[in-house]
Image (cartoon, helix red, strand yellow):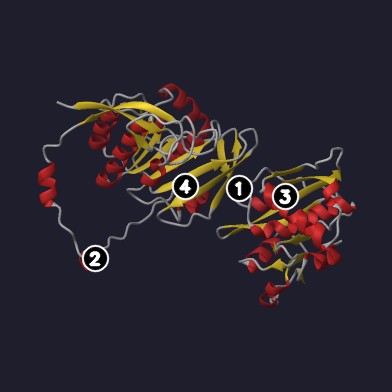
Amino acid sequence: MAKAKTIYFCQECGFDSSKWMGQCPGCGQWNTFVEEKIESKRSTGASKKLQSAQPVALSQIEMKREERFTSGFPELDRVLGGGIVPASIVLVGGDPGIGKSTLLLQVCRNLSAQNISVLYISGEESLQQIKLRAQRIGTFTDSLSLLCETNLEVIDGVLRREKPQAVIIDSIQTMYSEMISSSPGSVSQVREATGAFMQLAKGLGITIFIVGHVTKEGVVAGPRVLEHMVDTVLYFEGDRHAAYRILRGVKNRFGSTNEIGVFEMREQGLIEVANPSEYMLSGKPKDASGSVVACSMEGTRPILLEVQALVCRSNFGIPRRTAAGTDTNRVNLLMAVLEKRLNLRLGECDAYVNIAGGIKMNEPALDLGIVLAIISSYKERCIDEKTICFGEVGLSGEVRAVNMAKQRILEARKLGFTTCILPKVAIDSQTNIDGITLIGVENVREAVAKIL
């Protein structure tokens, strides 16, 4: 007979304890422990498995080249590392209404057009609701099958019988196992369901995409072990009221985690943005102070952004510092550098810094753009709209080199920029680039003198 016992789980990190605690020792969060009953079961074949397990030498392992297959979205393939890896499990997280289900349904359409058998398992929507969204997206082939089910045992039997090549689980928080008495979405249910899907993916060679809800902090709901179990973790970012969406990889066992994919939400679904730099710079004001174009790198892709700053006299004793799209502490640090090195009286002013378009970037190469935008707004002097800048700013006011300077310059030249302000230490290796004037600066004072 199975024996039931009570365990307390942390909803944030999955830490378990035999008694309730106010603060979790694992993650330090308060009031996150929930009570769940666990049934301990004895496995009759455990001794046989232990006796049959044999280690294998590294030289005896034969490598099989697994060919990736495309999702039909070059942006998604880039984030995944070059395409979808067979027998992998991918976790897709994001805010409600951001477009997770829409993107995966479009991936199903593209895969079914390649005669790849796809099974879409929904635990939140009915078949009629999925059909309504599918009619808006486009035409589907019979290679796509739909299933509305949340019982893990039933889904296991369907996958073993049908053996599709790709499966979409929407979402993991709705799946439950009858072997666990806790409700769907609990720590135990999420962990059990993810473990079961991982075994199915590796054992049957099925590629599984899992949709995960996020908490108010912006991380996938459930135990932290959920992200450790899967092969790839993707986050869908952006304001659901805005048109653009950014797909960012935070974990990838088969590729880099520095790549991003840019999409635009339209009536017929998500459309790829082939040139995000031109998209982000659309609507840039002319002859406006406090505006400058900077270049940031996301993986191997340069993205040009408009950095805006508004500096005005403060009406209170403590000036306000607000940053949208970048780190507020970094803005405070750069303003302290300007006060010390350029003798600017910024301590009496409110400062607001914004990365136009709502995109979030924290690369140090944006430092020079933030500095020049603040000074431009403070002095009410405009920066030439055909000028771009990038570089890291140190505490002594020096402008330090950043990586991939040539790719940034080529992207700026392609979009019609004629002047580039960059660190002087990086200008020597870029002498063979024509069509754009390169100005190397050693410190912030020199940059201000040449551009304002």
Q: Is residue 447 visible?
A: yes
Of the numbered discs 3 and 4, the one sitting upstream in the chain is 4
Give the Cα separation between the discs numbered 1 and 2.
Answer: 44 Å
In the figure, 162 relative to 74: above or below?
Answer: above
Within-10-Å neighbours for mark 3: few <14, some 14–19, many 20+: some
Of the numbered discs 2 and 4, the one sitting upstream in the chain is 2
Inspect the image, locate mark 2, and give the three-letter code of the amino acid beneath it. Answer: Leu
Of the numbered discs 2 and 3, the one sitting upstream in the chain is 2
In the figure, 228 relative to 55: above or below?
Answer: above
Q: Label 4, on which residue?
A: 72
Residue 164 figure quarter: top left
Give the Cα separation between the discs numbered 3 and 1.
Answer: 13 Å
Q: How far from the left and from the top, in percent, is residue 215?
A: 51, 33
Q: Label 2, on which residue?
A: 58
In the picture, the disc for residue 273 is: 1
Q: How many marks?
A: 4
Q: How far from the left and from the top, in percent, is residue 353?
A: 75, 47
Q: Residue at x 54, y 38 (%)?
A: 218
Give the Cα separation between the discs numbered 3 and 4.
Answer: 27 Å
Q: Of residues 325 and 200, which is closer to you in this image?
A: 325
Q: Residue at x 60, y 37 (%)?
A: 265
